[in-house]
């Protein structure tokens, strides 16, 4: 306990909660698994679910899961009542259990602590659990998403999501931004009309919002610096690993900010998110096997790259060279893990039960990785061909972004895009009328765009002409034009895609695992 002058400050754990001071030892304290370290030598009660069970004569090793972590709880026939012993006997995977026992430090065990059980109650005996350590396809797992959420990998990913959310709120709140909510039902398109979800609204058409930006601009003119944090919708008809139909977007909007200030803000926000994840999510990153070096490099110093320069990079000889290297590396990795899988199969027969479980888990990982590599080997030549054929004036596709990011060791900010493919609200570069003052942050390691934004058009006549040029109904934008009628100022903002950011931080392949219940072209269940 830190001593501070005349006061003794209570110790705080990683959540900032005071560590309990135990006054009476007579009734066991209720403890979550992540707080067992504060109860060494004491008797505690844990409530949770049975994650895994191994048994030998007179002993059950129960791995308990309570949402905060895993802990091995040892039930010895000699140490508990007959009733408790029978309950432990009967408990199946994912049965709910309340147990009491003494906490012992044991570095070898998951979580670093073990519980010697003195009493146990089976709250509900689970039916045969459908998700077992054996291999399941992604479709099966997504169909059982409501249960898949209980597995360790999902635990890690979604806790990182939580950390990212907290970092974002803290970052903006500390800087005097107000969190403001934009409407979800809107009468207008923001980001192009091709991805609008249309619905009937009392005899009229309404749309699910694609972005809170336009309303964000109105709120910035009222409050200075604001950010929205809400669900956004895109009727994406493509099945890619970067697209959801419902995703969460964080959209700061700032009066009196120009493009440079906005790029700086995006860099600092991402630096904060990454820094907090490295500080607070070590266990989670380790479960995911995340290589942390690229994250450590991503705290600051993001290169600014103009669109022109990015095109040059994309079409360079170096890109072709990198693709060839990636193909060779992927082929080698596939061969290595196939060999590893063969060894596993050979050793399986003589393996002990716990070794079998380990081999099964690794095999699952190997098969997952092999599918990814196969996809990579199919994609790489096509990506290179499309990069070579890329023409100035068109937008980067996902694969172009991937190739560009390989040239850098941290996120980059691409800016000043040809205005043809950018949204109607973007300001033109006063120094080059061909380009708009937009910017995208591309995450490294092939992840690509996670942030899009820029400086907004401030001139009423220009904005009106853009709305017309984009074929949008001017009447619906009357209120938006008003922002240029009453004290129009330089202002900017961006949208950060939460799921894309979490996907990158976790270092995982597909963004569907970064949201509890993903919505995609072909998924509305569960
Ligand atoms: O680049 P976008 O379309 O920009 C806007 O919507 C601006 N109005 C934001 C602003 O300036 N306030 O989308 C912003 C980010 C993308 O960079 C990406 O991270 C994410 O939103 N995003 C998606 N994430 C998942 N699935 C989709 N279908 C996404 N579409 C965009
Ligand atoms: Mg974009």
Image (tube, rainbow, N blue to C red):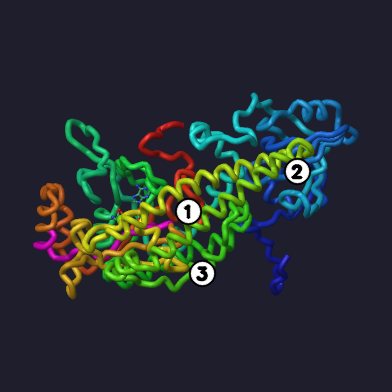
Mark 2 or mark 1: whose residue is earlier in sequence: 2
Q: Choose top left, top right, bottom left or bottom right for residue 408.
A: bottom left
Residue 149 in the image: above or below residue 488:
above
Instruction: Tell me if 361 is positioned left or right of 42 in this view.
Output: left
Q: Which residue is mark 2?
A: 72
Please determine whether, in this image, residue 275 is positioned above or below residue 107.
Answer: below
Where in the figure is residue 356, as x and y percent of width and height?
Answer: 73, 39
Residue 382's x, y, as percent?
36, 52
Q: CA distance from mark 2 to mark 1?
A: 30 Å
Q: Residue at x 27, y 39 (%)?
A: 197
Q: Which residue is mark 1?
A: 502
Counting residues from the start of the chain, the first of labels 3 and 2 encountered is 2
Residue drawn at x 68%, y 31% as measured from the top left:
93
In this picture, which residue range is highlighted in magenta?
A: 447-463
Secondary structure of the residue carrying tag 3 is helix
Tell me the element at label 2.
strand
* Residue 495, percent from left and from top: 34, 57
Q: Is residue 231 left or right of residue 135?
A: left
Give the alpha-carbon distance from disc 3 to disc 1, as whole Å.
Answer: 17 Å
Of the two numbered discs 3 and 1 in the rendering, the one whose residue sits closer to the viewer: 3
At label 3, counting other C-alpha atoms closer than 10 Å, the crowd grade (few under 14, some 14-19, many 20 or more) is some
Q: Which mark is residue 297?
A: 3
Q: Which mark is residue 292?
A: none
Q: x, y percentage for residue 311?
A: 30, 66
| Res 124 → quadrant | top right
Between circles 3 and 2, the one closer to the viewer is 3
**Residue found farthest to the top:** 127
Question: Quick check: is the Cβ at mark 3 less than 8 Å away from ligand 1?
Answer: no
The residue at the point 26 percent across, 57 percent down is 395
């Amino acid at each position: 306990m830190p001593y501070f002058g005349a006061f003794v400050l209570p110790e705080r754990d990683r959540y900032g909660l005071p560590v309990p001071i135990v006054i009476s030892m007579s009734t066991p304290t209720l403890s979550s698994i992540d707080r067992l370290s504060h109860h060494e030598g004491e008797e505690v009660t844990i409530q949770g679910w049975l994650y895994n069970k191994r048994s030998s004569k007179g002993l059950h090793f129960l791995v308990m899961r309570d949402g905060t972590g895993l802990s091995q709880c040892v039930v010895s026939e000699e140490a508990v009542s007959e009733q408790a012993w029978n309950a432990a006997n009967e408990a199946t995977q994912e049965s709910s259990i309340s147990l009491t026992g003494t906490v012992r430090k044991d570095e070898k065990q998951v979580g670093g602590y073990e519980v010697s059980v003195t009493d146990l109650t089976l709250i509900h005996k689970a039916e045969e659990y459908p998700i077992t350590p054996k291999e399941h396809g992604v479709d099966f797992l997504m169909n059982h998403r409501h249960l898949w959420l209980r597995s360790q990998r999902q635990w890690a990913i979604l806790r990182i999501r939580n950390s990212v959310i907290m970092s974002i709120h803290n970052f903006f709140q500390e800087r005097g931004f107000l969190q403001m909510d934009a409407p979800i039902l809107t009468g207008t398109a923001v980001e192009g009309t091709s991805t609008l979800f249309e619905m009937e609204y009392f005899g009229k058409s309404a749309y699910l919002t694609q972005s809170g930006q336009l309303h964000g601009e109105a709120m910035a003119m009222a409050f200075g610096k604001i950010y929205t944090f809400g669900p956004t919708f895109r009727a994406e008809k493509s099945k890619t690993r970067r697209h959801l139909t419902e995703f969460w977007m964080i959209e700061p909007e700032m009066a009196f900010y120009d493009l440079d200030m906005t790029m700086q803000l995006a860099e600092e926000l991402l630096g904060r998110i990454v820094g907090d994840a490295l500080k607070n999510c070590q266990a989670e990153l380790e479960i995911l096997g995340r290589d942390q070096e690229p994250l450590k490099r991503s705290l600051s110093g993001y290169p600014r790259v103009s669109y022109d320069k990015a095109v040059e990079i994309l079409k360079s000889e170096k890109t072709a060279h990198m693709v060839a290297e990636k193909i060779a590396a992927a082929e080698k990795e596939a061969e290595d893990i196939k060999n590893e899988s063969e060894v596993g199969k050979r050793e399986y027969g003589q393996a002990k039960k716990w070794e079998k479980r380990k081999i099964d888990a690794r095999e699952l990982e190997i098969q997952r990785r092999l599918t990814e590599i196969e996809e990579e080997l199919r994609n790489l030549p096509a990506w290179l061909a499309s990069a070579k054929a890329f023409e100035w004036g068109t937008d980067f596709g996902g694969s172009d972004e991937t190739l560009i990011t390989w040239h850098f060791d941290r996120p980059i900010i691409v800016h000043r895009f040809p205005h043809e493919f950018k949204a109607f609200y973007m300001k033109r570069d006063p120094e080059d009328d061909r380009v708009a003052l937009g910017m995208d942050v591309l995450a490294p390691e092939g992840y690509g765009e996670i942030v899009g934004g820029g400086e907004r058009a401030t001139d009423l006549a220009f904005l009106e002409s853009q709305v017309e040029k984009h074929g949008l109904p001017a009447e619906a934008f009357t209120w938006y034009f008003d922002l240029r009628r009453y004290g129009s100022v330089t202002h900017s903002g961006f949208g950060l895609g939460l799921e894309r950011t979490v996907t990158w931080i976790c270092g995982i392949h597909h963004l569907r695992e970064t949201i509890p219940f993903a919505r995609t072209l072909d998924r509305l269940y569960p």
